[in-house]
Amino acid sequence: MAPPDDLSLLLAVLPERLRRAVRRYPEDALLEVVMDLGRPAQARLVGGVAQLGRNPVERAEIDHVVARLGPFSSDNRAGIERTLHRISAIRNRQGEIVGLTLRVGRAIYGTIDTLRDLVDAGLNILLLGRPGVGKTTKLREVARVLADEAGRRVMIVDTSNEIAGDGDVPHPGIGGARRMQVPEAVGQHAVMIEAVENHMPQVIIVDEIGTEAEAAAARTIAERGVQLVGTAHGNTLENLVMNPTLSDLVGGVHTVTLSDEEARRRGTAKTVNERRAPPTFDTVVEIVDRDEVVVHRDTAAAVDRILAGVAVGGERRRVVDGRVAIEAEGEPEAAPPPLPQPGAGPVPTAIRGPLRIHAHALSPDLVARALRDLRLDARLVERPENADLVVSLKARSHDGRLRRAADRGVPIHTVKRNSTSQLRRLFQGLFVPPEGVDEEEVREAVREAEHAIQRVMNEGVAVALAPRRPAVRKLQHRMAVRYHLEAESIGSEPGRHLVIHPG
């Protein structure tokens, strides 16, 4: 018996003259066979298009193919049972089929090497790319890997039967994943919700999210803690952000009118676009071709950069000689500074730059504006473990994503609301020297605190600092807290001074 996705099963439905013509081309090069009434048939190949003879397609030949297929659904698609081949129909005004596109379906294993770490991490992943680039093939492989290798309960919502094949028995390419078929394409969103409510999946796989109802269903699934992996119409993240129907998948966009003062402070027009909500999908993957993708690990940060008019960045991943090579798009992030070790040099201070800041659950655009307003020498980084400090929304400060950063000694500061004014107050309190204090006095106090912090961390002893004015002691206190050390003020003015203790 031929393998379920053997090309011969697709060729068997063609008229004999077209079958002979197609066999002249390598099987792995064939993408589609196109039949239009009254025009010569074509074979669309990896390297171009070839005409299958000079004779035009006759109605009897179209009827010959249709008679050998399963029924066409409301979206004018049919298939061959237990294969991944897809046949799409073009109809005239009377509903008669006058054209066919026979797409070759193949189950290709090992196509998700470039995003395997993202899949294993349990992230909600959205795949984008031009038609025919391999989105559905990768989706099918994700389902198989999560079901068979990760042992997770995977449910596929298969609207066009393109993921798991035509017929009631799914194609073996999905492994142990289960499949729910969608009777009518307009009901895909209802089946997505039904899958979650009735079958207790850990993962939902869905192809071609294309309506507001489906975007809303995707958000509902993600909010219930189910991993969601899907595809959507659009070649790039920028396309999706500007798509009013689907932008909700990446947080949505709304227009904000600023006051005159805020617009002057930002250096923008009074009306600006900002992200409306947290994205449904944690990560967006733009598929360039089978062995190359561009990954936006943090969808929220990438969308904020697009709306701010700056380079979106990302990771370009390629399979080279069987290995995945990762190259940062745009300016690469520097490695995090090492924590002080015995015999190390001076500890870097909180007011030296450029300071690397990670914005967690906050708009990076707002954080950047607050830094610009205070003229701080700082820049934003995407990963908390690569930061000198993390600024987080208070309600999200215990997020597991910050654990690695906290374990490495990166301080985490919080604000109650995602607003420029709160961020400015936080940064001003952390980094701006107090008014009325001599600059030389501040430099001397910083140097003293540096050496004291180094001794406390290297030797594990408490170190007393020289008496300082309250505003300067406060600055030294913040430096100690940054390295998770304890500090207390002792004595009476004017001899009151700070003592730094091991944390």
Image (cartoon, helix red, strand yellow):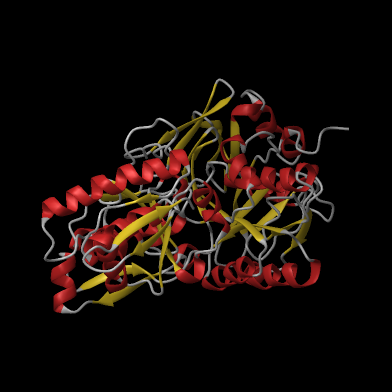
Residue 265 in sight here: yes
Residue at image coords 27%, 70%: 425
Residue 311 in sight here: no
User: Would you say 237 lies left or right of 64 here?
Assistant: left
- Most distant residue in the right direction: 1
- The answer to which image quadrant residue 188 occupies is bottom right
- The answer to which image quadrant residue 291 occupies is top right
User: Would you say 297 lies left or right of 29 here?
Assistant: left
- The answer to which image quadrant residue 106 occupies is top right
Compare residues 366 and 123 and report the one nearer the observer.
366
Residue 236 spot, x, y in % from top left: 42, 50
Compare residues 369 and 377 and report the one nearer the observer.
377
Residue at image coords 18%, 74%: 262
Quadrant of the frame with the N terminus: top right
Residue 350 spot, x, y in % from top left: 30, 51
Compare residues 369 and 112 and report the one nearer the observer.
369
Q: Is residue 26 above or below residue 404?
A: above
Residue at image coords 61%, 35%: 113
